[in-house]
């Protein structure tokens, strides 16, 4: 019996470890990376589909070949010393990617009372970027991170010239993360960060008992996540996946940047009727152009996840974007940059990231909570 259990677990980990095989690669992306000034090939450039397993490095002659079924995810080209290039329309083209050298920047040096210890800066960074300071998710090259702190504004910024190599032991991933910006305002605990990244499996040699736990942890990270919500929205299956949408003004925040991470998340109206009368649906926020779906948010939208396991009052929000910009969404959970999140979904940090190829295992939803959200809805 134990032998059959072991075989099952090994088969399971093989399936989820190569989830990209669920969608058979149908597009071959080829090209060459060169220096924009000299025209010489650039070797060792990272060429990848953002947020996926699909990543390669350019060869000595600058050439690369990438196979994928996903053509609605940006193609990213990154290399130390060069500006990152982001391509949206690359399918069926013979690509010649010209990288521009990064301009030389003088890092700001803070002295005297305007400083914070690197230990404290790192503590804040790990908490707000990674999501924890434990051993389950670690950055293998923390010395490549540099910080700047302004005492007067209480603003901490961070950057890295090299990609951050992150090992998420709980989820079994290695993440190569090209951090392009990090800001944390201590007075309001507002955090903003952005960057591009790709995944690799990090489960080789793991014992079956641990693999089973990893599968469970990945499922836990997925359900109720931004990826889960976007997939449900794209498929017009919000109700089936226990999401509810409401137009609301019951919202507080300290800013309007993407990935708001403030803790003043949710003010619950005591009148159930007032909330239910403002119910919104797929048709209220989705626009279709050229057989592609775009999210269009003109009012603050409250997202309630009725399967959320917490018993607190935290919820999620989609915020209006200046100029009513529309953001592309895809069936695998990808979403464009013109989406502003706040609340529970914005609090999901790097330690909860999943590749877009991820597919959940057979999942048993948690029992219905007795929290106040469920008593209302």
Image: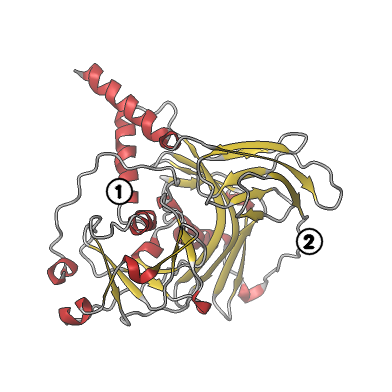
Give coordinates of residue 2: x percent, y percent. Answer: 22, 19
> How many numbered circles does the render carry?
2
Q: In which quarter of the image is the N terminus?
A: top left
Left or right of residue 178, residue 203 in this image: left
Tag 2, which secondary structure? loop
Q: Name the residue under label 2.
A: 104
Residue 220: give its label: 1
Left or right of residue 153, residue 136 in this image: left
Q: In this view, does 142 lie above or below 125?
A: above
Give coordinates of residue 149: x percent, y percent. Answer: 60, 70
Outermost residue toward the right in this view:
38
Comparing 144 with 60, the one in front is: 60
Identify the residue shown where x is 71% and y is 56%. Answer: 83
Mark 2 or mark 1: name the one nearer the start of the chain: 2
Q: In this view, does 298 lie above or below 176?
A: below
Q: Is residue 176 above or below residue 336?
A: above
Give coordinates of residue 254: x percent, y percent. Answer: 44, 79
Outermost residue toward the front in this view:
290
Comparing 300 with 105, the one in front is: 300
**Marks 2 and 1, how far apart in space?**
43 Å
Q: Quadrant of residue 110?
A: bottom right
Left or right of residue 135, residue 280 in this image: left
Q: Is residue 323 above or below residue 104?
A: below
How is the structure coloured here? secondary structure
Identify the residue shown where x is 48% and y is 73%. Answer: 186
Comparing 170 with 141, the one in front is: 170
Neighbour class for label 2 at 10 Å: few (<14), some, many (≥20)? few
Q: Quadrant of the C terminus?
A: bottom left
């Amino acid at each position: 019996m134990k032998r059959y259990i072991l075989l099952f677990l090994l088969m399971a980990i093989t399936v989820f470890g190569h989830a990209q095989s669920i969608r058979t690669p149908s597009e071959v992306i080829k090209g060459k990376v060169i220096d924009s000034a000299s025209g010489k090939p650039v070797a060792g450039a990272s060429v990848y589909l953002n947020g996926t397993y699909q990543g390669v490095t350019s060869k000595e002659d600058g050439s690369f070949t990438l196979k994928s079924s996903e053509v609605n995810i940006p193609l990213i080209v990154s290399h130390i010393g060069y500006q990152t290039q982001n391509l949206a329309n690359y399918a069926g083209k013979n690509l010649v990617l010209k990288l521009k050298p990064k301009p030389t920047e003088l890092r700001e040096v803070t002295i005297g009372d305007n400083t914070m210890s690197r230990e404290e800066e790192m503590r804040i960074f790990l908490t707000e970027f990674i999501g924890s300071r434990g051993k389950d998710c670690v950055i293998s090259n923390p010395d490549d991170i540099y910080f700047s702190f302004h005492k007067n504004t209480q603003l901490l910024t961070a950057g890295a010239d090299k990609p951050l190599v992150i090992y998420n032991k709980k989820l079994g991933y290695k993440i190569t993360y090209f951090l392009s910006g990090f800001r944390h305002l201590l007075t309001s605990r507002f955090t903003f960060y952005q960057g591009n990244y790709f995944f690799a499996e990090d489960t080789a040699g793991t014992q079956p008992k641990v693999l089973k736990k990893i599968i469970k942890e990945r499922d836990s990270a997925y359900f109720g996540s931004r990826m889960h919500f976007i997939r449900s929205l794209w498929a017009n299956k919000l109700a089936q996946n226990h999401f509810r949408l409401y137009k609301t003004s019951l919202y507080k925040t300290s800013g309007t940047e993407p990935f708001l991470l403030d803790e003043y998340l949710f003010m619950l109206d005591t009148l159930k009727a007032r909330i239910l009368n403002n119910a919104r649906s797929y048709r209220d926020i989705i626009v279709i152009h050229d057989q592609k779906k775009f999210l269009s948010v003109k009012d603050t939208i409250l997202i309630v996840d009725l399967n959320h396991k917490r018993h607190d009052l935290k919820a999620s929000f989609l915020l209006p974007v200046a100029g009513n910009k529309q953001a592309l969404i895809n069936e695998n959970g990808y979403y464009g940059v013109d989406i502003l999140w706040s609340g529970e979904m914005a609090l999901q940090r790097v330690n909860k990231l999943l590749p877009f190829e991820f597919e959940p295992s057979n999942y048993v939803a948690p029992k219905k909570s007795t929290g106040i959200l469920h008593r209302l809805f």
